[in-house]
């Protein structure tokens, strides 16, 4: 890598051309990645891509005037001081917040580059263009806000907010809810069967932990291997698997921890209260994110939980 202060004026122009080309392609990737779910925001980044293309064209014309047709290949990774960027194709699916934050950081970095580059150059023409581009990059974020205001009217914003909520439910809430339901309900039977069979808190705790962690691992792999998310839009499979597995384990551990209480009867009462709390949380999530009527959600969850609980008690008492 080379120090920025050691670059010649030709290398500075070549680096600026490379930066503008990279930013242009990043904005094109942003636009393409957002087009299906957030078409209006994709249009915003299409506009920003066009602006970066204009910057690159002006830099190339100046380079041709000053140094000829050949442009040295000088890239950001060849010069010290630039922040390493994660490739856009590795960030899927794209989220609006992530994209806007990344774009803002890109503009700040590019503006600082032009300001520093202009201060180092002696040629009046090169300095003038770099100063102009620094000023344009300074106002680029404002231009992006103007583009958003033009393209994203109230109705479009509502549509994109609904799309954002749909993706959040699909990629986060659904695997988390599936795990929480499995962990909270399916582990009831082994935990309470062990509790009533042994009348010993510690034995019930060990069985509960084994069931919870085992169920978490099983559900995590099952969710991760169910599909890769490319067609369903459900997001990265291993992220879904991690969410589902963690929530499954959490659901089982919740009513297992009370059995750390040495007094068996007190532990049983506390565990039962935790079970009611867990089922209430599941009911609320189903109502809040899955649009299930509260009464219907409560009856479904309560019925399933009660059947598994009774099964565990009957098996443990036999």
Image (cartoon, rainbow, N blue to C red):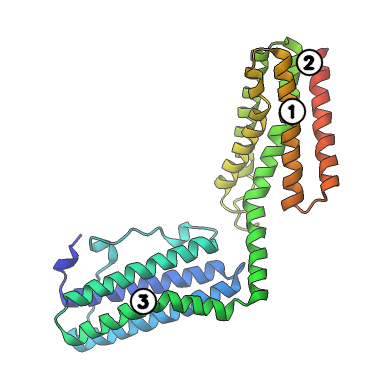
**Helix, strand or loop status at disc 2:** helix
**Separation (CA) of disc 1 from disc 2:** 19 Å
- Residue at screen point 63% across, 58% down: 167
Q: Going 70% across and 18% down the picture, which residue do you hit?
A: 267
Label annotation for residue 273: 1
Whether pointer 3 and pointer 1 mark residues with C-beta atoms closer than 8 Å, the reply is no
Residues packed near mark 2 inside 10 Å, few (<14), some (14 to 19) or many (20 plus): some
Percent position of residue 90, x then y: 46, 57
Disc 3 from disc 2: Cα separation: 70 Å
Q: Residues within 10 Å of mark 3 (few under 14, many from 20)?
A: many
Q: Residue at x 49, y 64 (%)?
A: 99
Viewer-nearest of labels 3 and 1? 1
Mark closer to the observer (3, 2): 3
Residue 152 x, y percent position in the rendering: 59, 76
SS type, badge 1: helix
Specify few, some or many for label 1: CA neighbours under 10 Å numbering under 14, 14-19, or 20 or more: few
Q: Nearer the viewer, residue 58 or 103?
A: 103
Q: Position of residue 73 (x, y in %)?
A: 25, 71
């Amino acid at each position: 890598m080379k120090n920025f202060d050691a670059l010649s004026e030709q290398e500075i122009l070549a680096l600026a051309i490379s930066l503008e080309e990279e930013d242009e392609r990043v904005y094109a990737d942003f636009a393409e990645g957002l087009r299906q779910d957030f078409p209006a925001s994709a249009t915003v980044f299409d506009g920003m891509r066009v602006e970066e293309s204009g910057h690159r064209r002006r830099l190339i014309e100046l380079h041709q005037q000053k140094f000829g047709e050949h442009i040295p290949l000088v890239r950001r990774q060849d010069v010290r001081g630039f922040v390493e960027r994660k490739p856009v194709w590795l960030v899927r699916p794209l989220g609006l917040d992530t994209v806007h934050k990344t774009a803002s950081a890109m503009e700040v970095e590019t503006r600082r580059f032009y300001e520093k580059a202009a201060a180092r150059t002696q040629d009046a023409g090169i300095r003038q263009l770099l100063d102009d581009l620094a000023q344009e990059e300074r106002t680029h974020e404002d231009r992006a806000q103007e583009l958003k205001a033009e393209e994203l009217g109230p109705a479009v914003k509502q549509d994109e907010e609904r799309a954002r909520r749909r993706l959040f439910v699909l990629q986060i809430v659904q695997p988390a809810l599936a795990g929480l339901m499995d962990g909270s309900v399916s582990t009831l039977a082994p935990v309470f069967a062990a509790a009533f069979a042994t009348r010993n808190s510690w034995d019930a705790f060990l069985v509960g932990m084994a069931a919870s962690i085992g169920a978490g691992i099983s559900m995590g792999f099952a969710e991760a291997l169910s599909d890769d998310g490319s067609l369903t839009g459900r997001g990265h499979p291993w992220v879904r698997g991690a969410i589902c597995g963690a929530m499954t384990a959490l659901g089982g551990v919740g009513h297992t921890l009370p059995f750390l209480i040495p007094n068996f009867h007190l532990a049983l009462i506390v565990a039962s209260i935790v079970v009611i709390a867990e089922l209430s949380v599941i009911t609320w999530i189903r109502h809040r994110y899955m649009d299930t009527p509260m009464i219907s959600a409560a009856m479904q969850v309560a019925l399933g939980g009660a059947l598994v609980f009774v099964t565990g008690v009957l098996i443990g008492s036999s």
